[in-house]
Amino acid sequence: MPWSRVALAVSVVAVALGVAAFVNARVVERNETAQGLAAWEQVYSVLTHPRCINCHTATNYPQQGDERRRHVANVVRGPEGKGVPGLNCAGCHQETNADSTGVPGGHNWHLAPLSMQWQDTNDRPLSSAAVCRAVTDRSRNNKLDGPALLKHHEEEALVIWAWNPGRKPDGSLRTLPPLTHEQFIAATRRWVQAGTPCPSGK
Amino acid sequence: MATYQLNVNGQRKEVTVDPSTPLLWVLREELKMTGTKFGCGISACGACTVHVGGVATRSCIVPISHVGERPIITIEGIGQDAVGRAVQDAWVDTDVVQCGYCQSGQIMTAVALLKHTPKPSDQNIDESMGGNICRCATYVRIREAIKNAAAELTKGGA
């Protein structure tokens, strides 16, 4: 066989292998993205639970309760999300839950900034795609990249509080998010490892 | 039961109570300081407002075990403070009070407002005082008294 034909055959095989590798990589990537999106939906199910979304409002006030009613006492957001002088969050919410009086508490109790609003101005939760865009937009999320988002979910006191929300004034326990904290962290980790993909759409 | 050392209006006080007892009832029942009022018991009306560590606090829902070392100022002690004195004087001069039940809480919140915002706007007053309910609806006079106190404090350089 002439050397030219050998070279041609080798080239064809090399191109075929390259294409196969490329296609395989794309398939793997697509699978990773699909798994990441599935993990995100789990994360989203937690973020839109009342324990989380009640303080991620688009309005001038926090919410409370599973029905996400407006906070009592005409509490307002204030310039730093901590209420206003004379009516600060810390005027009721102490460092830990006060189960005997039914008032939740945690370190540095405050509203999330408006850039992290997960509701519209009519208190309806934003779509999965919209919340994902907000959470991953470093110009809105306090410059958190994927690993920093994971750390935030793992360690932030008010995030962790959602799984230890204490008792209501009637003595019953507040409801918990749909995942355990461990499941939430595992889902966040899968989502981050997949590159924090977001669903398409509004 | 547990024993707590409290700093109330600059004085050391010792009380032995159940840790879950709200600060309001420690003040009223243990220390016999009845100027701070019980209104709703769920932090919705502001009648029980005192200052804890400088923060206007709803004493009806804060268990004594959560107070710690933070100093407590009540309506009985607020007149020792320049802003507190000015607010109390303005309250009298403006004849704010009708039945009076909510007024200790109103004054404590107004002092907290003026300490952080010496020249409050109407919006500042509405937002800060919005959680203090007055069944006699003395809101117009409360607003006027706060502005009078602010003017007096500004004039006096306090």
Image: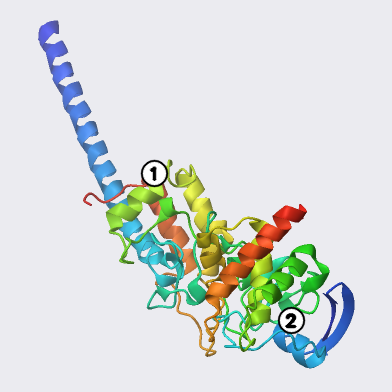
Picture residue at 26% right of the left edge, 48% below the top? A31
Is residue A86 something one can see in this rendering? no
Is residue B158 placed above or below A75 in the rendered structure? Answer: above
Instruction: Identify the disc placed on residue B64.
Output: 2
Instruction: Identify the disc placed on residue A137.
Output: 1
Q: Are marks 2 and 1 on the same chain?
A: no
Number of numbered callouts drawn: 2
Q: Nearer the viewer, residue A96 or B97?
A: B97
Instruction: Identify the disc placed on residue B143.
Output: none
- Expressed as whole percent of the image width and height from the top left, the position of residue A86 reads 62, 67
- In the rendered image, which quarter contains the N terminus of chain B? bottom right
- Expressed as whole percent of the image width and height from the top left, the position of residue A27 reads 23, 42
Front position among marks 2 and 1? 2
Label 2: state its secondary structure. helix
Picture residue at 20% right of the left edge, 36% below the top? A23
What's the distance in space between the residues labelled 2 and 1, CA to CA?
A: 42 Å
- Provide the chain ID for the residue under circle 2: B
* Lateral position of residue A199 relative to residue B43, left or right: left
Name the amino acid type tagged 1: Asp
Is residue A160 placed above or below A168 in the rendered structure? Answer: above
* Lateral position of residue B31 relative to residue B58, left or right: right
Label 1: state its secondary structure. loop
- The residue furthest right is B12
Is residue A115 placed above or below B98 in the rendered structure? Answer: above
